[in-house]
Image (cartoon, rainbow, N blue to C red):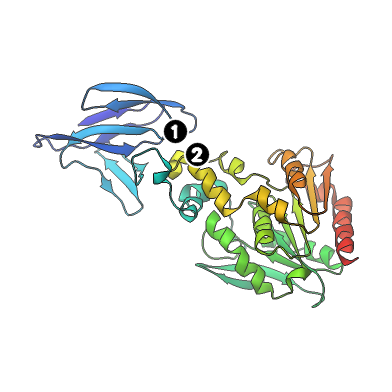
Amino acid sequence: MLNTLYPGRSLISLLTRPDDKVARPICMAFLPSPACRQATCYNISQGQSKRAGSEGLLLTLAIRHGARPRVGGDRRIVSADRHMMLSLQYLVAVQVEDKRVRTCSELLDHPIISERYFFPRTAPIPRPFLVECDGATLACSYHQIAADGFTIVHFHGNGEVVADYLHGFPELIGRMACNCFLAEFRGYGGSTGRPQLGRMLADVQPTIAAIQQPIDKLILFGRSVGSLFAIKAAELFPDVAGLILESAIADPLERLLLRVHPEELGTSPAGLAKAVCAAMNTRQIMARFNRPTLILHTRHDGLIDASHAERLAEWCGGPVRLKIFPQGSHNDIMYVNGQQYFALIDEFLQSLRD
């Protein structure tokens, strides 16, 4: 039995066959937790060890011929003995280079991002407006009061669902003589599928197309994580009437790094940054978007700092109005500032009609 102790983590046990005569080294990626910045990298064949940083750490083990770990269908290495079973992230390449980086879609759809970044819940709604996407059906809700009027396309926040907005929000938007389309995400509410960032960004195009309204009559509205999809829609449909961002995210990579470590995804920090930028370069999108933008945030947002709103406003290539409320926080900005909040939206809609 060959045992290696990794500081701060579990005991790794790799089975060997006692009848084997030749020990062959193999390379396996051992991914430290974000809290562990250093680990001991053991070279069993030479009986030596060295210190290595957490980024791209390779644990080189010499085990007897025939004792190679089994690679599961989920691309993980499974190692087990009588006492434990654990999985180690399997990297296609052993070099700590961008060669091992997965495709953009594979990275953003990685199960670790899905599990740690998204907080879906089930909440079916009556008479859903169904949008067919690749591998999922989205249960949206469409409230139309004027066929030739503007339509706000609303992307809600994380942990929220369309059902949270059914009572009151469409009515308030309707009083502004505006239609309201509440977009749902895969895996949320009454939708099928499961949350995967890459696929959710891809769902934006069929969602907008399903509304079947002139693009210049649409106003994109993104709250919190929903801002990623509103901004993506602004990239795909730059001729929309306008864009509203509430408690929005300026830097998606910054948000991801709060909950995942690049090595856990089988990539380097540069590889993850490249994938996120390829999927949506927020700064570039905002700079190229020349339609009017309204940005709402609170000074005391404890989840997404107000600096995100300030950066987004600075990057805007078109007319922009930034309002940072002195009251409220991330989850009660609309309720605490209700009268002024909706007055600003109404003024924004009026400016688009003028």
Q: Nearer the viewer, residue 311 or 287?
A: 287
Q: Is residue 84 visible?
A: no
Residue 269, disc: 2
Q: Is the C terminus in the top left, top right, bottom left or bottom right quadrant?
A: bottom right
Q: Position of residue 317 (x, y in %)?
A: 76, 52
Q: Quadrant of residue 200?
A: bottom right
Q: Is residue 204 left or right of residue 39?
A: right
Determine the CA span between mark 1 and mark 2. 8 Å
Q: In the visual, does 202 lie left or right of 210?
A: left
Q: Are marks 1 and 2 in contact (CB under 8 Å)?
A: yes
Residue carrying label 1: 55
Q: Quadrant of the N terminus?
A: top left
Is residue 298 among what the camera can see?
yes
- Residue at 39% x, 30% y: name it: 9
At 54% from the left edge and 65% from the top edge, which residue is drawn? 192
Amino acid type shown at disc 1: Glu
**Residue 161 in the image: x percent, y percent?**
65, 58
Q: Quadrant of residue 258?
A: top right
Residue nearest the observer in this picture, 247 or 290: 290
* In the image, residue 321 above or below residue 35: below
Asked which secondary structure carries label 2, the reply is helix
